[in-house]
Image (cartoon, rainbow, N blue to C red):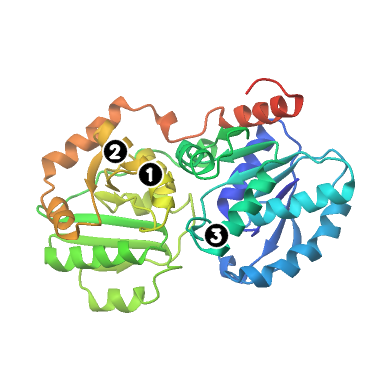
Amino acid sequence: MMLAPVATEADFWAHHNGLRRAGAAVSLMAFERTHYEDKRRDGCWESLGKVEHGRYLARIPKLLAAVPKVLRETRAGDALYCFGLDMLGLGWAVSVLRRRTCPLVLATRDIHSVLVGSSGRARLLRALERFLVKRTLLVVCTSDYYVKKYYLEQQGLSDARYAILENKLDAEKLPSRELPPRERTDGVLTIGYFGLLRCPTSWDFLRRLAETGAGRIRVVAAGLPTGIEDIESDVAAGPYLEYRGPYLSPDDLPDLYSRVDLVWTIYPYGVPNQQWARTNRYYVAGYFRRPMIAQRNTPDGYEVERSGIGVLIDLDSPDEAIAAVLGITGTQLGQWENNYDAIDVARFTITNDYERVLEEMCDAERGVGR
């Protein structure tokens, strides 16, 4: 049984469908949030009730109210695959009330900023997380940097068992990797900023970059502006900015990626995840062979530099970053695109990833290896 904080998040369904194809019997119970209502639901699921986005304390009574329902819908011995700390707490409560251990799996997509810091609340939440993870069969992370830098170095959870399941793309659902030939305008770079648009620092930089470029830079944004309040008014005031609204993945991806020369892959800047996360944009841009703009000294940045598929910038030095982007030449773009020839598409798409996670879960339950 999977427990998710929202029913319509694509990543949760990716885990659900991937583990099912790997041979697991999987069902999903999730909360509902109006914040995500415009996203497509991918399958059957059981509602745990409605919660409001971002109101974490108000969510506690909802979590407690969901315990009896999860108890009714699960059988003794069922593994509870929990997305995030709050769902892990729900799963642990169900396990305790069963009076028979339910194997618990924590799926960590990111480390919430509230968990990192020296405040009393941060220390309390980290202590709660340590308590729960010590009772968890397996922690599934999207990046090995989460394991090294957070769970081992900060939390000291060296006895926990970990598996890496990157945010790779489901090849079975993807359209062709080959995009229509792009007609470039000499001296003009078009940058795509797609997905959850929740980094004000990124948007402010892109606006300033377009303004400074005075026609040499165009920015095309698409997706949900969850952290950028005035995106439409910004676009109306900026002649080199375009916002195409929400889009459907993977259906709309070829059209979006065929419009741009470079893809902005930088994660919400200034939060701990920036140093540890592997972004969805990295995998999509890589699949469609689009050069990337990546933040220096991040997991994506290391890969972009190692493979020669884009430019690294540092948002701590915006003037230098603007100069680096404005200095990109057509020859460089062509070389970055050609460098994809040496990269196996499996770096960006799922192969046997879910089979490996399922095997790790089974080994952990049997106490085999580490």
Q: Are marks 1 and 2 in contact (CB under 8 Å)?
A: yes
Residue holding disc 2: 304
Residue at 71% over, 54% down: 89
Q: Position of residue 190 (x, y in %)?
A: 22, 56
Residue plotted at (24% across, 49% down): 261
* Residue highlighted by disc 1: 282
Q: Give the image quarter of residue 158.
A: top right
Q: Is residue 4 visible?
A: no
- x%, y% of residue 7? 65, 58
Check contact, mark 1 vs mark 3: CB within 8 A. Answer: no
Q: CA distance from mark 1 to mark 2?
A: 9 Å
Q: How many marks?
A: 3
Q: Which mark is residue 210?
A: none
Q: Is residue 126 above or below residue 212?
A: above
Q: Which mark is residue 122?
A: 3
Give the alpha-carbon distance from disc 3 to disc 2, as whole Å: 33 Å
Say few, some or many: other residues with alpha carbon within 10 Å of mark 3 (under 14 / 14 to 19 / 20 or more). some
| Relative side of 358 to 94, left or right | left
Real-space Cα distance between discs 1 and 3? Answer: 30 Å
Q: Where is residue 214? Give x, y as percent.
A: 11, 67
Q: Amino acid at mark 1?
A: Tyr
Residue in the foreground of this view, choosing between 282 and 121: 121
